[in-house]
Each structure stands twice: as C-alpha cells, then as structure tokens.
Image (cartoon, coloured by chain):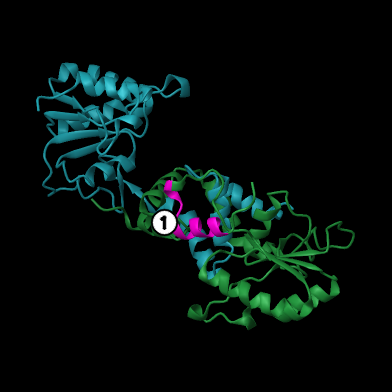
Chain colours: A cyan, B green
Amino acid sequence: MKYPLHLLKLIDSLKRLPGVGTKSAERFAFEMISWDRSKLIEVAHIIQTTPDQLKHCHECGSLTDATLCTLCKPGSSRDNTLCIVAMQRDVFAIEATHGYSGLYHVLGALLSPLENIGPDQIDIERLKRRIAERQIREVIIALDSTLEGDTTSLYLKEIFEPLKLNVSRLAFGLPMGSSFDYVDGGTLARALSARATY
Amino acid sequence: MKYPLHLLKLIDSLKRLPGVGTKSAERFAFEMISWDRSKLIEVAHIIQTTPDQLKHCHECGSLTDATLCTLCKPGSSRDNTLCIVAMQRDVFAIEATHGYSGLYHVLGALLSPLENIGPDQIDIERLKRRIAERQIREVIIALDSTLEGDTTSLYLKEIFEPLKLNVSRLAFGLPMGSSFDYVDGGTLARALSARATY
C-alpha cells in the first residue's frame, strides 16, 4: 500500500529541509496532518511571509528587524574589529559564544569556481569601503574550513595585504569534547602542526 | 544580538515538529528563508491543504485517496486476517515489511485513563462489526509496547474472548542489530522469557 498522493507531496516538501530524510519527513508529515486547521494555517502563513518581513542590515548584511542591526547602529559600543563571515546565521553563531565584541561583515557567499561564484558576488568594494569608514585595524576571517572557505580566505588575505591590517583566521584543531576515534586525519594533522605550548 | 522577531516566530513554528529542537529548527528556518518565493508559497500551500485532501478509508480507517483504501475495496485479494494498529502510519510501517497479507483496523487511539481516552474513543462496536462482516478468524494485535499499548491489548483480548478468534500480539524481544549495551533490562527480561528453540 502506497501513501496517498497528497501525503507524498507533503513528505517530499519536507524532505527539502536540510538533513531531513524520508523517515523524518514522514514523521513530520504525520504530525502535521494531525494538527488543528488553525495551527496549520498559522504555520503556512509564517513560512510564506517570513522572508519578506526580514531586513538585511545596510552596513554589515546581517539579519535584522530594522535598517541597521543593533551592532552597526550609531551608539553601539562594539570594537573596531571586523569579523568576516559567509552567511547571516554565522553572525548569530559567533555572538552566541560571547567571545567577540567587534563588528561583522556578511559576504553572502564563498568563492567557488565550480558554482560560478567569483569576487563580484561577494562585493569586495563594499567591504573595503567599510574597513576605511570604520577605521578597522583588525580583521578576523571566520569562514568554513572547506575548499571554498580556504579559497575565499586566501583571496581576502591578498586584498588586505596593502591595507596593513592585522588579519587572522579562526584556529583549526580538535573540536571540543572530541574523541580521537572520530577525528579525521586532516584535522589531526592541522591540530598537530598548530599545537600550542601547554 | 538576538534573532529578528519574524525569524524567531518561524523557528518556534518549526520546533513544533516531532524531535526538532532549537538547533534543527534554526537550520530549517535559515534554509527556508533562502528559498525562492514560489517554492515557499508552494510548501506553505501543501502544508495548509494536505489534511483536507486526505480521506480515511470508511472500513479500516487508514489514509487513502478514495472512499475505500486499496486493501479494503472489493476485489482486493487480502486474507481474512485482521491486524489492529493504533495509528494510520502503523499500517504503512507494517506494509513496508512485506510480511503480512491481511486486512488492517486503525483504532485511532490507545486507551489512556490519564488522558481520558476510554473504550468509547476507539469504537469497539465498529471493530466487532467488521470482524463479523469480514468473517475474520485471526486477529493480530500490533500495538506499542507501552503502558497504553498493554492496556489496550488486554482490553481487546477480553473483548475477543467470546468471539473464539485466534488472537496474537507482536513478539517482544531484542530489536534487530541491537547490542546488549543498548538494550534495557525490561526488553532483555522479555526476550529471555520468550526465548525460542534455536
């Protein structure tokens, strides 16, 4: 016996979410069809309208309710350090560490020749302008440790070279709470070469 | 920095899905706000309309596109065995094993004095009527191995007593591929007492 056609459609829609396979999508779908009509209408409405309600900070590009985010708006007491991230969600992830008190810059993408994403797509001129206007002296590159992240980091490093900035990139090494059994060779090699006096 | 209000609403909505915590809901929400408008409208529409499009088989209560499901409709070659399940999704789970060729009966709930679910809610008369009409001789009780599942199974067993049916319940024991380390004491005790000649 196959699932009814409409249920299959709902399952397929839910499978588009990241990390959701058939099993999870089925569980979500069976839960959803048990919801009240009002709850379903509310959730459908929220899904459909949220992107229109969100604004991008005109300065740093992160998500906000207003034109400027709380970090960029005048009167904010953040340091003149700039943390460069790829995506808007990365800003929230770093903020959640409570280990950084500077400003952010969201690139919106990583350089990827395979996906045809070149320097134009990440608007380097806007980044340079911000560094000048905000009198930034220190830049932290907080990009993925993937091929695209490495390519973009290298590109940024070259761009920053003539600007005489203090540039750093996030450390590579063992994730916290990790066991050797689950750490790949590449990570281990990086952790070894970057070992610190203890 | 907090999430914008509308994004928070979307995250909260997604947290209503089973097994979805804050982290997953955040990932889902960030993925969704990156979707095209047309995709969002489509998904929202599917979520909102699916329950109205689904029908319940008039006989067994399982989900279907028509008035009767493919198993109950005339001409179906299923055995006169009845498998009693709690929820509609259980029918699909058992069908997926390809180990059963009889009919189903969806109770729609399990007896639960705590949640005020009594015999009335599971419509025992309809079940008895089906057993008579379909001339069922064998009944398989396929309910959860929880307090509610046990209570309901016991109740059904008493109901079936005067009907002279061949009644069985799903076996309890070690799940396939399970390691002793991860099996609880209750399961192990049941597996031991129900051990089979090997």
**Magenta segment range?**
B181-193
Left or right: residue A37 compared with residue A157 = right
- Position in image of residue A151 (x %, y %): 33, 20
Q: Which residue is mark 1?
A: B10
Give the residue drawn at x 64%, y 50%.
Answer: B197
Q: Is residue A191 above or below residue A81?
A: above
Q: Residues within 10 Å of mark 1 (few under 14, many from 20)?
A: many
The foreground one among B101 and B155 is B155
Residue at image coords 33%, 26%: A149
Q: Is residue A107 left or right of residue B109?
A: left
Dominant secondary structure, magenta:
helix
Local SS, label 1: helix
User: From what the image shows, is residue A140 above or below residue A72?
Assistant: above
Q: Horizontal placement of A24 versus B166: left or right? A: left
- The reply, left or right, for residue B76 in relation to residue B157 is right
Tell me which residue sits at (25%, 40%) in the image.
Answer: A59
Q: From the top left corner, tell me how far across and down residue A191 is, in percent.
A: 23, 24
Q: Let me know if residue A92 is in the magenta part.
A: no
Q: Nearer the viewer, residue B155 or B36?
A: B155
Whole-percent x and y of residue B19? 45, 55
